[in-house]
Amino acid sequence: MAKIGWIDSHCHIFSDEYRDCFDEVIKRAEENQVVQMLGICCTIEECEWALSMEKKDEIDIAVGFHPSDIKVACNWERLEELTRDPRIVAVGEIGLDYYWDKDNKEQQKEAFIRQIELANKVNKPIIVHSRDAMQDTIEILMQHSCNRKGIIHCYSGSVESAKILLNLGYTISFAGPVTFKKSVTPKEVATMIPLDRILTETDCPYMTPEPFRGKRNEPSYVPYTAKKVCELKNLEEEAFQKACLANYQALFHSEN
Ligand SMILES: [Zn+2]
């Protein structure tokens, strides 16, 4: 079990963005009491690079084909091989993105379902990306259940949709937008999510929380998002940290 501290359950630390400064980024995260990170790999190459590094307990790895990337040829065989690696804790991020791509909805749905089935085959949870596609996301998760469940990351839907996803067994993760002055719904959702189904993330390099909005995001900024959620839920920081760590361990480090 990791030390008590903050969790970044979704960061793209293995992307090219951090290739030249990886060690410093991790060091700054540790200095800011970030005790657990889940690095999301959207390509085979990113994942191979992640696996080539020395194993660190505070850094886990996930791999999956992002809905915005499935227009190009995907190496499904290699993806399956990689997801079988014991260091890969989840399949993701996978899902639907109708904000960037409206013209290949069926292809996105197929890739999403295929990767849920892959997660079940290798007995791992999923990390779900859903943008402007909540209705279809929910429908797919209802019809194609992931046995180990998973995270709906950077949640941006309504309170009603969150309730449905909770009923389906998923955990809701919050990123930078919950700190933005004008964002109302993420704050309402964060307030109502039960403590045993909540997580925090940066989704770096994007979604930078206040007060760094506009700068490149990184895991060391996750405390700003987490503290905002704490404040909304009227919780002591340590109680919230312990809850998030327990949720994270239950999802990724328990063989159920
Ligand atoms: Zn992401």
Image: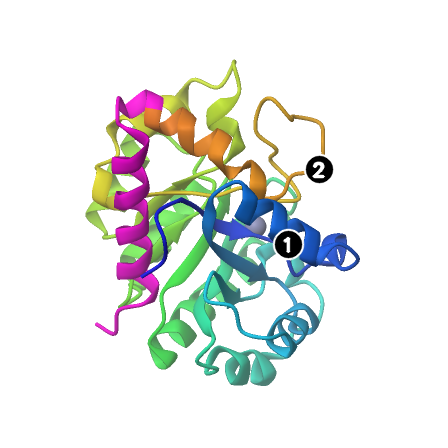
Query: Which residue shows up at 54% across the image and 74% down it?
Result: 55
Nearer the observer, 143 or 88: 88
Report, in whole angstroms, how far the alpha carbon at label 2 lies from the one at label 1. Answer: 21 Å
- Image: 51 above or below 230: below
Write the start and end of the magenta stretch as one range: 231-256
In this view, the residue in front, 48 or 23, is 23
Q: Nearer the viewer, residue 54 or 217?
A: 54
Q: Main secondary structure of the magenta part?
A: helix
Q: Is residue 171 left or right of residue 95?
A: left
Colouring convention used in this rendered image of the protein: rainbow
For label 1, the residue is: 68
Q: Residue at x 62, y 62 (%)?
A: 42
In the figure, residue 47 lies in which quadrant? bottom right
Say whether residue 133 is magenta: no
The residue under label 1 is which amino acid type? Ser
Where residue 49 appears, x then y in whole percent? 68, 73
Residue 235, relative to residue 207: is it above or below? above
Indicate the secondary structure of the residue bearing disc 2: loop
Q: Residue at x 34, y 51 (%)?
A: 139
Q: Amino acid at mark 2?
A: Arg
**Residue 5, horizontal then vertical, whole percent:** 39, 44
As drawn, 136 above or below 113: above
Q: Residues within 10 Å of mark 2 (few under 14, many from 20)?
A: few
- Secondary element under disc 1, as helix, strand or loop, is helix
Residue 216 is tagged as: 2
Image quadrant containing the N terminus: bottom left
